Amino acid sequence: FCPCALVLATPTAVMAAIGQATKHGVIIKSGEILEIMGKVDTMVFDKTGTLTHGQLSVQSILVVDTDYSEVDILQLAASAEAKSEHPIGKAIVSHAIHQDLEILDTTSFTMSVGKGIIAVIKGVKLYCGHERFLEEHNIIIDERVQQNVNTYRSEGKVSIIIADKDHIIGVIALSDTMRRDTADMLSAVSSLAMKTVLLTGDSKETATYIGKKAGISEIHAELLPGEKVSIIEELQGKHHKVCMVGDGINDAPAMKTADVSIAMGSIGSDIAIETADIALMSEDLSKIPYIKRLSDATIRTIKFSIALSMAINCIAIILSLLEVLTPTTGALVHNVGSCLVVLIAARLYDRKFI
């Protein structure tokens, strides 16, 4: 009657599944997370660096204040963003370095997460961010600038407005490209009967452009990190099990709130990777539906092994009472049951889920 097979059913399946995932470059931090992932019915995605390459490149620079040239605007923006960890800031700095521009020292640097940054360069306070950020600091955005920003958005581009003191000096437009496997990944996720949601701080136009192209069912744009958290909590309030996929520092609060979180380990920020329950060691998005299929298979294996071990124990007890099994044959049946459960779990290690 000793229930060794019953005790072995769950840990052996979990360890085999974690080993299988590790072989494919997926780090799952605990068995509990693997089980929760099997219950997930809603996948929430960040955009920049997750569905897109996250490698923004400067496409154009709009000069608003003629006292500055395009080179001046790029140099000031790059110097202000030099301490930023955001992909937009890194792209501007990279472009400036490629143009052999000097990165000027900043005497002060302040970042408003999801909004923009303020830096002091040579005694001048510089603002870099989107419209709401500048409006919060009483910087007026005129009609010409707004029209250009709207045009960039309709083309799927991101705009960073640069302001010197109390007026706008220029706009830098950047673009990102969607990963080639994004549409296939989202199609695979949808085929697993899961809802897909996009949460991004980008404009509605940019988010809609990417979201529709990728085939995402629900799109939320112009979100601050706290607003992303609120939407996830709202989904959880409707009894959804939510998995959040992200890569940046802005995603960390939402990832912490979600039932399960996945970080793009190869390009993600340290905070996002530390916060995440699962880390992808490559940029292969096909690993996301793979994780779900692996989790579902693990749950099925655990349930089958538990049912099998209980059935073997019950049958063995009845046969013992009927004196069909002796102590020797009973011990053999007991060990056979344990071995069966281990072998069934071991199949997870070598099965293909991709």
Image (cartoon, helix red, strand yellow):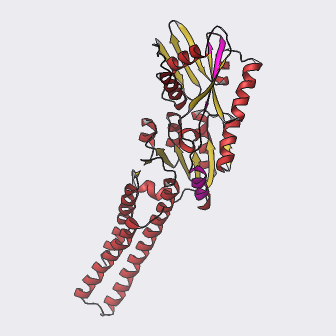
Was residue 181 drawn as part of the magenta stretch in this picture?
yes
Q: Is residue 29 left or right of residue 139?
A: left
Was residue 32 drawn as part of the magenta stretch in this picture?
no
Region rendered in magenta: 163-189
* Quarter assignment of residue 59: top right
Front-most of residues 81 and 100: 100
- Residue 257 image offset from top left, x and y in percent: 52, 43
Q: Residue at x 59, y 49 (%)?
A: 236
- Residue 338 image offset from top left, x and y in percent: 31, 75
Residue furthest to the top in view is 123
Residue furthest to the front in view is 99
| Quadrant holding the N terminus | bottom left
Q: Eyeballing the image, is 182 above or below 62?
A: below
Front-most of residues 226 and 310: 226
- Residue 315 image offset from top left, x and y in percent: 38, 85
**In this orientation, does residue 186 appear?**
yes
Q: Eyeballing the image, is 236 above or below 125?
A: below
Q: Is residue 339 left or right of residue 25?
A: left
* Quarter assignment of residue 331: bottom left
Front-most of residues 276 and 183: 183
